[in-house]
Image (cartoon, rainbow, N blue to C red):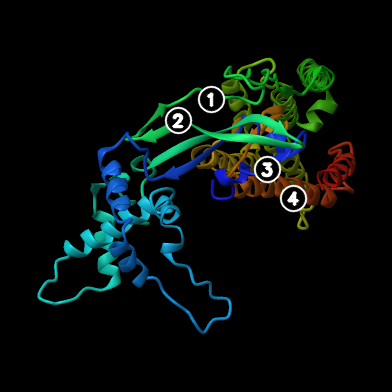
């Protein structure tokens, strides 16, 4: 309402122009002092102001008007030139609001507590002004306790409808019709509103839009589930083979307990692929949030089990074959299981803190909107807001396990494959390290 005045349409617009078509049926909201006949105080204000339209009062008012005779651009405005126009202007628009603002300043000054002094400063006056409340010309004046701005629900507003009347020559003429008034905290309808089509029937709302929800999709989901199934099948298959051949020389040399940990770790990492392959197209949002939590748990557990078993196995080999004094040495399973337990405990602490302080959630967000701000496309994913510290900590731990395993495998690279297949472990880990980066 500050940029468009109701006087904008008084000269009309070119018939058929964009301004004509856009203005037809439009509505402007503006703050007003009041509406004649709807508030006794406002009517008394109008009556009192119009009573000033007499020679004596006009002369007094004119005496307060500043003059700048030495300014070349000065226009010597006098009320006597058109007193009716002057008094019409001071009873409409923002003038009644300015009148109440001056009354509020006076009341707040009168209400000041001087505390033994004969003056007060602007800060004290402003603090008192914000507490002032009175029923004035423009309604129940109340102010914001921090900014001192007039509270909107205590003011009056008017809806002005720009109604097309006729076309004279090439000019489309409009009439400004007041249709609704906001007063005493509620809207009151004064007259039916005319819409763009020239009728008083509201146009229908925009047809509802069904947003396009982007999902993982059938192809990618099947691919992920096939990868998980393959991992499970291989892990279970090798576990069955290992159990059947646990007494064979090859299996004994490869140490079944470590082979079992590696297979269990692979099985868990494969399971995390299942959680990544499902979204809210098939399961609920709450279930997807659970999957967001389970993915790092299963993947990190599987990673640590597999690689800590590998480096525990190579540590065991290195301790035996890199014994410079050739003394009898016994390395028990308990000795090499200690790193597995320690690493798993550290990972558990990181994951528990992650869950407590930055719990991952499944969120579907709008990615595209139409011209009217309605969503037409959405995408969903796990939200890891505030999790960057935990992610970095966990990744550092997992890559450290990989790096240390690689170091141990490199140190045992020359050991006979009859006792340890470290040459192949080293090559596989080197390839995995390259893929990780």
Q: Position of residue 355 (x, y in %)?
A: 53, 37
Q: Label 2: state its secondary structure.
A: strand
Q: Marks 2 and 4, how far apart in space?
A: 77 Å
Q: Marks 4 and 1, how far apart in space?
A: 78 Å
Left or right of 309 in this view: 91: left
Query: Which label lies toward us, 3 or 2?
Result: 2
Q: Label 1: state its secondary structure.
A: loop
Q: Earlier in the sequence, mark 1 or mark 2?
A: 2
On the image, numbered disc 2 is attached to which residue? 180
Q: Label 4: state its secondary structure.
A: helix
Circles 1 and 2, Cβ within 8 Å, touching? The answer is yes
Q: Earlier in the sequence, mark 3 or mark 2?
A: 2
From this view, report whether residue 80 is shown above or below residue 45.
below
Picture disc at residue 404: 4
Query: Which label lies toward us, 3 or 1?
Result: 1
On the image, numbered disc 1 is attached to which residue? 193
Farthest residue to the front: give it: 55
Q: Marks 4 and 3, how far apart in space?
A: 19 Å
Q: Earlier in the sequence, mark 4 or mark 1?
A: 1
Q: Position of residue 399 (x, y in %)?
A: 73, 47
Query: Which label lies toward us, 4 or 1?
Result: 1
On the image, numbered disc 3 is attached to which residue? 331
Q: Quadrant of residue 253?
A: top right
Q: Label 3: state its secondary structure.
A: loop
Q: Earlier in the sequence, mark 3 or mark 1?
A: 1
Nearer-the-camera pick, 272 or 309: 272
Nearer-the-camera pick, 436 or 425: 436
Circles 4 and 1, Cβ within 8 Å, touching? The answer is no
Q: Position of residue 196 (x, y in %)?
A: 65, 26
């Amino acid at each position: 309402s500050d940029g468009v005045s109701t006087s904008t349409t008084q000269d009309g617009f070119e018939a058929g122009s964009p301004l004509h078509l856009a203005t037809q049926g439009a509505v402007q909201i503006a703050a007003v002092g009041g509406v004649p006949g709807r508030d006794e105080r406002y009517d008394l204000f109008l009556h009192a102001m119009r009573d000033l339209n007499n020679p004596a009062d006009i002369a007094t008012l004119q005496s307060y008007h500043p003059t700048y005779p030495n300014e070349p651009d000065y226009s010597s405005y006098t009320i006597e030139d058109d007193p009716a126009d002057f008094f019409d202007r001071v009873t409409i628009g923002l003038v009644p609001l300015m009148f109440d603002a001056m009354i509020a300043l006076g009341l707040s000054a009168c209400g000041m507590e001087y505390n033994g002094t004969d003056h007060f400063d602007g800060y004290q006056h402003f603090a008192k002004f914000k507490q002032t409340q009175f029923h004035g010309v423009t309604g129940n004046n109340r102010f914001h306790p921090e900014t001192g701005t007039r509270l909107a629900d205590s003011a009056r507003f008017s809806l002005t409808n720009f109604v097309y009347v006729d076309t004279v020559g090439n000019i489309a003429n409009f009439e400004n019709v007041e249709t609704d008034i906001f007063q005493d905290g509620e809207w009151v309808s004064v007259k039916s509103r005319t819409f763009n089509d020239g009728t008083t029937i509201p146009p229908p709302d925009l047809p509802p839009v069904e947003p396009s929800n982007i999902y993982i999709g059938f192809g990618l989901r099947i691919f992920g589930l096939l990868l998980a199934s393959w991992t499970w099948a291989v892990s279970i298959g090798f576990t069955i083979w290992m159990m059947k051949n646990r007494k064979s020389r090859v299996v004994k040399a490869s140490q079944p307990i470590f082979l079992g940990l590696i297979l269990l770790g692979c099985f868990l990492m494969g399971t995390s692929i299942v959680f990544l392959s499902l979204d809210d197209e098939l399961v609920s949002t709450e279930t997807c949030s659970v999957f967001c939590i389970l993915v790092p748990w299963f993947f990190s557990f599987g990673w640590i089990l597999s690689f800590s078993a590998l480096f525990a196995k190579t540590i065991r080999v290195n301790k035996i074959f890199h014994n410079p004094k050739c003394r009898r040495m016994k390395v028990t399973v308990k000795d090499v299981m200690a790193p597995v337990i320690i690493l798993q405990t550290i990972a558990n602490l990181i994951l528990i803190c992650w869950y407590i302080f930055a719990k991952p959630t499944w969120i579907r967000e709008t990615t595209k909107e139409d011209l009217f701000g309605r969503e037409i496309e959405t995408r969903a994913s796990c939200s890891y807001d505030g999790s960057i510290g935990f992610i970095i900590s966990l990744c550092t731990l997992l890559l450290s396990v990989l790096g240390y395993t690689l170091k141990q495998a490199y140190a045992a690279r020359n050991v006979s494959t009859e006792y340890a297949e470290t040459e192949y472990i080293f090559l596989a880990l080197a390839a995995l390290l390259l893929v990780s980066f």
